[in-house]
Amino acid sequence: MSEMLEKARKYEDEQGKQIKAEDRPAFHVSPYVGWMNDPNGFSYYRGEYHLFYQYHPYDTYWNSMHWGHVVSKDLLHWEYLPAALAPDEDYDKIGCFSGSAVEEDGKLYLYYTGVNYTVENPEDINLCLDEQFVSAQMMITSEDGMQFDNIKDKKTVIPVIQNSQIGDARHTRDPKVWKEEDGWYMVLGSTIEDRKGRLLFFKSTDKEHWDYVNSVSKGEEFGWMWECPDYFEVNGKQIIIFSPMGILKDGKADENQAICMQVSFDKKNCRMELPDTYQFLDYGLDLYAPQSTVDAQGRRILMAWLRMPQPVDGKWQGMMSIPRVVEVKNGKIYFRVHPNIQNVYTKKIDSPKEASDAGYRLRFSLQDGEEVNVGGYRIFRQGKKICTDRSTLYTAFPQFRTEFATPELADGFDLEVYVDQNLIEVFVNEGEAVISNAVYQLGNEIKVQGNVSVAIETLE
């Protein structure tokens, strides 16, 4: 075991024991200690779901990136495992950035971006000076999905890109790998001169040697760098998801957002055509860097990182959404609650005060002008839109958005709302649109305006 990984595991073991189970979300994945961001290596392997994540165990802020690791048999109950990757080689000594996982012949392959600073900041060696860093694409394998040899097994599979007409030596990252009939494919997020985001496509026959094939880009209004790309097919449609940096320009925090769209993708030459319009992955604008896989039943499922402005009890920061099933209906991309989650919230209660530590679910429909206030978090309908407002729960964070709305919906305003102490997820019309928001100091009262009938359910 490398020295850096051993140090991280020892620290998280000592500190993690101080966080009681009841102080963690029950079914939302959070960091074992410290800081969490992007989901990585989300995969179904040997009868278990593996979810790795960007992880800084030593404090509740972004810094030298490790990979944390959790597993689950049902997408409900997650077991924390020791950190899987640590930044301990010259090519990744500043961080093991985001990536994905694939399986072949019983072996798990992890792909990630290794980052190294070319000029360190003399005042803080964990920071670079004037964006002087480079990024390469790495691979590491495991025979059991649990043990990774951080000393001998890390390999550079795509070196730092030197041709600025293809991509950026710094901002090229987040490999998503998948298999087609003719071999293995990889898509990377990149940029051209920090001005316009683009995706880079590579092919391989052996998962180790990769050839650049093509790229796709769009106008500058789509952001300057495209992070965490994810390509897949569902319901006979080709889908791309990515997270453009700088796509929102309203002066608020989190101008980087996750979007999705249906595309045309010619796999032979990796030629992708992007439409002029897109959907937000989530209209709460707090979720970022989503990643998908296929579940045990063959459904395309997805999880994403919830950005949080401050740590919970000073101990951990960042959460994952509940798993969502991706579907295409009526020309729209839907994200509905995974049945494994839906099927366990069945115990009817009269008040949130009776809920289990897994929180509770609300189900109701809204007519125009009606509202349900969930402990200070307002959910209401304006015309053909569902809106939310967390203003009273976010007074400490004036730089963040507090009001949200879905696009106009054609018909039906049935809501399924999952409530955690620090995360509320509002699913409209079985995933036609979703609003997910971080919250703080959530109350225990539910108030209704209008003739709204609210069902409250928790775990049996």
Image (cartoon, helix red, strand yellow):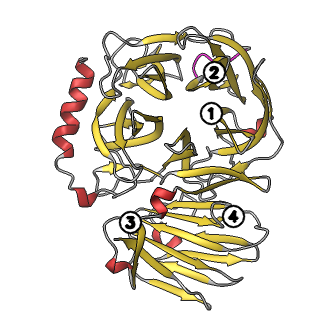
The one nearer the camera, 181 or 365, is 181
Q: Which mark is residue 185?
A: 2
Disc 4 or 1, which lies upstream in sequence? 1
In 3D space, how far apart are the residues under numbered discs 4 and 1 (Cα atoms)? 23 Å
Within the magenta stretch, is there residue 169? yes
The answer for how far apart the CA atoms under marks 4 and 2 are is 34 Å
Name the secondary structure under disc 3: loop
Disc with the residue nearer the chain's start (3 vs 2): 2
Q: Residues within 10 Å of mark 3 (few under 14, many from 20)?
A: many
Figure quadrant of the N terminus: top left
State the mark number for residue 421: 3
SS at mark 2? strand
Q: Does the magenta portion include 411?
A: no
Looking at the picture, how far across and down is residue 174, in whole percent?
A: 55, 28
Q: Earlier in the sequence, mark 1 or mark 2?
A: 2
* Image point (72%, 73%), residue name: 412
Mark number for residue 229? 1
Place of residue 258 in the rendered image (x, y in percent of width and height, measured from the top left): 62, 45
Q: Secondary structure at mark 4?
A: loop
- Residue that numbered label 4 is attached to: 406
Q: Which residues are magenta?
A: 166-170
Q: Is the residue marked by circle 1 packed among few (<14), some (14-19), or many (20+) residues within 10 Å?
A: many
